[in-house]
Amino acid sequence: MTTTLSRLSRATLGALPAGVAAPGYDIDAVTPGILHVGLGNFHRAHQAVYLDDLFAKGLSHDWGILGAGVMDYDAEQRKALMAQDCLYTVVEQDGAGDAARVIGAMRGFLPVEPGCAAILAAMADTTIRIVSMTVTEGGYFIDPATGVFDPSQAAIRHDIANPDRPKTIFGAIVAGLKARRAAGEVPFTVMSCDNVPHNGRVARDVVVGIAEGQDTALAAWIKDTVAFPNGMVDRITPATTEARRKYLRDTFGVEDARPVFCEPFRQWVLEDKFTAGRPKLEDVGVQFVPDVTPYENMKIRILNGGHACIAYAGHLMGCHYAHNAMEHPLVSAFLEKVERDEIIPVVAPVPDTSLEDYFTLIRQRFSNPRIEDEIRRLCLDGSNRQPKFIVPSARDNLAKGRAVPGLALESALWCRYCYGEDEQGVVIEPNDPDWDRLTRQARAARDNPAAWLEMGDIYGDVAKAEAFRADFIGWLNRLWAEGTETVVRDYLGKA
């Protein structure tokens, strides 16, 4: 066990404990070229790590990260990271052991304030050539029933009416692009790093939608000149707990308020569409492709859909972590059957990729015991995730005349979870931005299962498909009558 403790900062960077790698470059030589919004664990384990690797090769030192945020919790994140000079530790974990490194790619974090004044000033600076973001799947103001930008939401209405004091990052982006246009400068690229299908197009729809509400000429200019590349991002990055921070202190001797723990695997596939240049990310493993769609479809359906399969079944059968779910014979078999029968068959071919090998890799990643990825995290935000990760696979199967008993059961398990109380009577704490509605619908569905399918913003036309409805209603009735284990066992055909 390590006894020397080093509080992470610029001053202690040259004297890190043994076993902790420092940035392989002079961080003072790195200047911001990317303004990134949303400095959560995923960004700091993914985009920032790729850039850290690139800087260590002596490349693209003018593409450092300037952090930003618009939410209240971003202010706490800023305070913690600024106190350690925007340095933080990434610990990669798997069965082969743990590897710790300090990331120096972030070279500042703007004040988080009403009106986004600091963000607007930074966007006016032409050294910022990319504005990127991780704002979660539900942060794009999209009507899930239609997949179209919804300008009626209060924050969007505010940004349209108050272009100089935006509340959302998208309103700020519109204001930043407006300033670039007025100055005759090249606009920055807007790059979504969120786990959203066609994330570039989705981000473009929001930005253009706000601009159209303000100035149709500005909206036309954005459409004609601004790049919004689509991208697929992947790395399993669990929440950082106090136990994990203690582990970092005890094992590696580093005191870090905002460490990140993650698996070794990472992937980033990007369309090579940038308005004002980009870092040489291909030199550190980023795949640049003409069309990201096949890659994101594969990842969202197989990995994220797979997470949903093990999440609700796993929780209701007493699993705490993802690897516990994979060790449970019924949960792992449920994943296997749903994937092979109903998900993988409707995933389009991916260039130079075996879907069989990809699914094998996914099973291995889910089974990593070192990650301790909490099932509760995988159950989070189903109202935004189900329409993206599960419902499309059901829709594609139904369109081909195929039954979807497994996906209907997954949906019934989600409904049972949202009842807010497990099979032992233990309360399930709120775990969705729309938890009150979900709980209300789930409670109504106990006596009338079809009530759950009334959520048209989630299920759309799938709720009207008789094959799906019949399976869902049958499964939910049986979950209440017989319990999760019996129902899943029956689905699997196990005696």
Image (cartoon, rainbow, N blue to C red):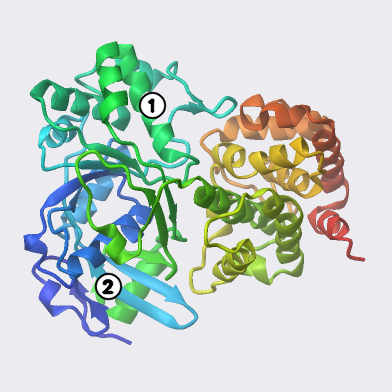
Which residue occupies the foreground of this view, 455 or 351? 351
Image quarter for residue 360?
A: bottom right
Q: Nearer the viewer, residue 443 or 365?
A: 365
* Residue 284 numbered mark, or none: none
Say what secondary structure mark 2 lies in: strand
Q: In the rendered view, tell whether residue 443 sits above or below residue 403.
A: above
Q: Is residue 221 left or right of residue 488?
A: left
Q: Answer left or right for 491 relative to 420.
A: right
Amino acid type, mark 1: Val
Quadrant containing the N terminus in the rendered view = bottom left
Distance in Å between CA atoms under marks 2 and 1: 36 Å
- On the picture, is 70 further left or further right than 418? left
Vertical side of 185 occupied by 108: above or below: below
User: Which residue ends up furthest to the right in the rendered image?
Assistant: 495
Query: From what the image shows, is residue 426 above or below residue 170?
Result: below
Mark 1 is surrounded, within 10 Å at the Cα level, by few (under 14), some (14 to 19) or many (20 or more) other residues, namely: many
Q: Which element carries disc 1, helix, strand or loop? A: helix
x then y, percent, for residue 472: 80, 39
Residue at image position (19%, 19%) is 164
Quarter of the image containing the C terminus?
A: bottom right
Q: On residue 101, which mark appears?
A: 2
> Which residue is drawn at the image coordinates 21% and 78% (left, top)?
5
Residue 405 in sight here: yes
- Residue visible at 65% across and 35% down? 439
How many C-alpha atoms fall within 10 Å of the one at disc 2: few (<14), some, or many (≥20)? some
Q: Earlier in the sequence, mark 2 or mark 1?
A: 2
> Do the CB atoms of the residues marked 2 and 1 lie less than 8 Å apart?
no
Q: Which residue is mark 1?
A: 206
Disc 2 or disc 1, which is closer to the eye? 1
Q: Position of residue 410 (x, y in %)?
A: 72, 48
Asked whether residue 49 appears in the rendered view, the answer is no
